[in-house]
Image (cartoon, coloured by chain):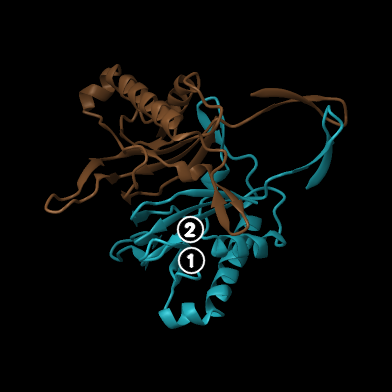
Chain colours: A cyan, B brown
């Protein structure tokens, strides 16, 4: 995915295709439907308390080598706010995590519609998503601070509609690309 | 902001700096604090019903020429869902609009922290934000379908913390850059 591009002035710039995109929002609590209601059964929801929502999308060309880098970056970037107003990582807070597959993040506008031609195929995307979730779970599980505080990780089901309720103290929305 | 870059293979690619970034989410209702509580006064909130939340951020180099293009694009892209499941624009729905200034969208990661060196200065950013809001209001006001349906437009205050509550039927998150 890396190719060298010579600029007019003779410099060489490494040009790399995007393989994944994440949007991060901080929350006080968040609730995601993981199974829609099918009469007579009510819908099923997962819920987190204070922590971070990660919306994630994979592009064509992504493979499992990107997962450790993504998890390391997203879980360690200092975007979560302590009671005292300091910015720390979600692992340091420690906070909960809600992971939401969001293929729409790969959209490109063509005329007035969004197209998703750069998105990864559904099966490959699901495999990467599950690896991403598993590695986040592993990271949380190996941090004593997180396990002692009872930090939780919840996630949506790939391919489903991601019905979400979000309550923030300022979403502090960030985009991080890989 | 446009410069021509010659690629190694002899083609010429127009490379343009980003001047603005927007993230769009669809909502069933959303509530944004526009004034924090100062005892004994409670906080002030604005609220919208079904429609679209627009998070917006301007970069260095942005000027007022980008505003009409942004408004035209964001209000006409077919991301809103009708009762029948069709995707139409927020103006066609017609839906409400909540505009949120979100300078954090301009962040770039350096080590484990986000830096905002590409963001536009505060005064210029505020001026552009106000123009953006005004033009969105104007677009809604000139659409009979919107005014007859009572479509509302609400927005956050530039520079404040954007305390947000969001209720979605699937946020259908999209990134659109200018």
Q: CA distance from mark 2 to mark 1?
A: 7 Å
- Residue A65 drawn above or below residue B79: below
Location of the C terminus of chain B by quadrant is top right
Residue at (30, 61) in percent of width and height: A39
Q: Can you give x and y, in whole percent of width and height, for residue A44 in the image? A: 35, 65
Picture mark count: 2
- Asked if disc 2 and disc 1 are in contact, CB closer than 8 Å, the reply is yes
- Residue A17 drawn above or below residue A140: above
Question: What residue sits right under mark 2 in the picture?
Answer: A79
Left or right, B165 with reference to A133: left
Res. B84 in view: no
**Which residue is more in the foreground, A26 or A112?**
A26
Q: Can you give x and y, in whole percent of width and height, for residue A69 in the image? A: 66, 61
Residue at (56, 69) in percent of width and height: A136
Res. B15 in view: yes
Chain of the residue under label 1 = A
Left or right, A56 with reference to A6: left
Left or right, B98 with reference to A178: left
Q: Can you give x and y, in whole percent of width and height, for residue A98 in the image? A: 45, 63
Label annotation for residue B117: none
Look at the numbered disc 1 and give the secondary structure of its residue: loop
Question: What residue sits right under mark 1 in the picture?
Answer: A90
Residue at (51, 82) in percent of width and height: A144
Chain of the residue under label 2 = A
Look at the numbered disc 2 and give the secondary structure of its residue: loop
Q: Can you give x and y, in whole percent of width and height, for residue A109 in the image? A: 55, 31
Q: How many other residues sit within 10 Å of disc 1, few (<14), some (14-19) or many (≥20)?
A: many
Residue reaching furthest left?
B40
Q: First in sequence: mark 2 or mark 1? A: 2
Q: How many other residues sit within 10 Å of disc 2, few (<14), some (14-19) or many (≥20)?
A: many
**Which residue is more in the foreground, B123 or B177?**
B123
């Amino acid at each position: 995915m890396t190719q060298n591009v010579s600029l007019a002035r003779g410099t060489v710039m490494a040009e790399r295709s995007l393989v994944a995109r994440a949007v991060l929002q901080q929350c006080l609590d968040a609730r995601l439907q993981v199974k829609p209601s099918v009469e007579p059964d009510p819908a099923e929801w997962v819920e987190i308390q204070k922590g971070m929502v990660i919306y994630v999308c994979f592009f064509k060309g992504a493979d499992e080598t990107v997962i450790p880098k993504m998890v390391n970056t997203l879980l360690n970037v200092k975007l979560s706010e302590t009671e005292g107003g300091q910015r720390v990582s979600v692992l340091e807070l420690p906070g909960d995590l809600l992971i939401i597959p969001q293929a729409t993040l790969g959209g490109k506008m063509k005329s007035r519609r969004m197209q998703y031609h750069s998105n990864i195929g559904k099966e490959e995307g699901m495999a990467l998503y599950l690896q991403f979730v598993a590695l986040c779970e592993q990271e949380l599980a190996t941090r004593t601070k997180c396990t002692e505080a009872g930090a939780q990780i919840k996630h949506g089901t790939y391919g489903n509609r991601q019905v979400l309720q979000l309550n923030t103290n300022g979403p502090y929305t960030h985009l991080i690309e890989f």
